[in-house]
Image (spheres, grey):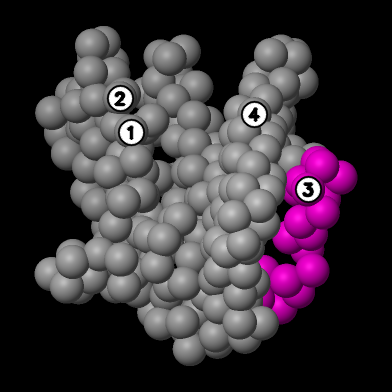
Amino acid sequence: MTVLSAEIAFSPTRVGALVMRYLYLMRSSWPRLAELVYWPAVQMLTWGFLQTYIRAQAGASGVGGAMAVAGGTLIGSLLLWDTLFRCQLGFSVSFMEEMWSRNIANLLISPLRPIEFVAALMAMSLIRVAIGLVPVTLLAFWFFGFNLWALGLALVGFFLNLVLTSWAIGLGVSGLVLRNGLGAEGLVWSVLFFVMPFACVYYPVAALPPWLQTIAWCLPPTYVFEGLRAAVVGHQLRADLMLEALAINAGLIALGGAAFLGLVDSARKAGALLAMGE
């Protein structure tokens, strides 16, 4: 292998080493692990008991049909929203571990390539979301009889699109934090909540004003949550929605990757890698 090919070769070994670093961090701190399950579980129980109350009230007032069906999508919407949110956090928090420890400069002057760094962050986002949400889906079935896994093939489309969206957002946010320092850290926790009202998590796109519907249909999560309602309420697999979301996600991933690489290069030129304060 020539020196040039060695420089441009993607190394799974380096990716695996970085993933192991993050796993060791998690294993050494039980609060880190507990937090992964705690917040999804609290939200699921809160919304689940609210759904139970809505169904009981709807049945008592004689309008149980539509109200109960609408309430039945709450837990599914919550679990999928948490998938998106926790996957983005899994990506961004692993990146923030390097910022908080002032280790980012060491990584980026090592043989580790930015694409390998991104691959390790993506792997950790999947690991963290699995640790956090798999137990919560079992709790949802135990407490409320909602089986997310029964969605089958539809769930694969939902999960794939939400993960891709979370990675695209994580790439952009991580690049901004790298370029602007820890003063931009708040974006890690807040950016998805700006998207939430337009992604139609708990209500259909038709509930929005017409001009906002155009914005909503530009966001991949909108297609996922519309697909969820079609699956739960109408028992339909909307493959068309999943393919449209996948096409938008492809563009977002390309844009996020280009933004991250551009911001890394900008941070290097500005000397921001050695000044990681507020």
Q: CA distance from mark 2 to mark 4?
A: 23 Å
From the viewer's perspective, tell me whether residue 244 is left or right of residue 272: right
Relative to 207, does residue 136 appear above or below in the rendering?
above
Residue 138 on the magenta span: yes
Q: Which residue is mark 2?
A: 186
* Of pointers 3 and 4, the one earlier in the residue sequence: 4
Contact between marks 3 and 2 (CB within 8 A): the answer is: no
Is 253 on the left or on the right of 82, as rendered? left
Q: Nearer the viewer, mark 2 or mark 1?
A: 1
In the image, which residues are magenta?
Answer: 137-161
* Residue 99 spot, x, y in % from top left: 40, 20
Assess whether mark 1 and mark 2 are in contact (beta carbons under 8 angstroms). Answer: yes
Q: Mark 1, residues whose alpha carbon is within 10 Å: few (<14), some, or many (≥20)? A: few
Q: Which residue is mark 1?
A: 190
Q: Do labels 1 and 4 touch, CB within 8 Å?
A: no
Which SS class for mark 1? helix
Between residues 5 and 83, which one lies in front from this camera angle? 83
Amino acid at dot 2: Gly
Earlier in the chain: of badge 1 and badge 4, it is 4
Snapshot quadrant of residue 215: bottom left
- Foreground residue, 234 or 62? 62
**Residue toward you, 78 or 10:** 78
Q: Which of the 4 image quadrants contains residue 24?
A: top right
Q: Quadrant of the N terminus?
A: bottom right
Rendered residue at 82%/42% (across/down):
143
The chief SS type of the magenta part is: helix
Q: Which mark is residue 10?
A: none
- Amino acid residing under circle 4: Val
The residue pinned by badge 4 equals 42
Q: Which is in the foreground here, disc 3 or disc 1? A: 3
Q: Is residue 269 visible?
A: yes
Q: CA distance from mark 3 to mark 4?
A: 14 Å
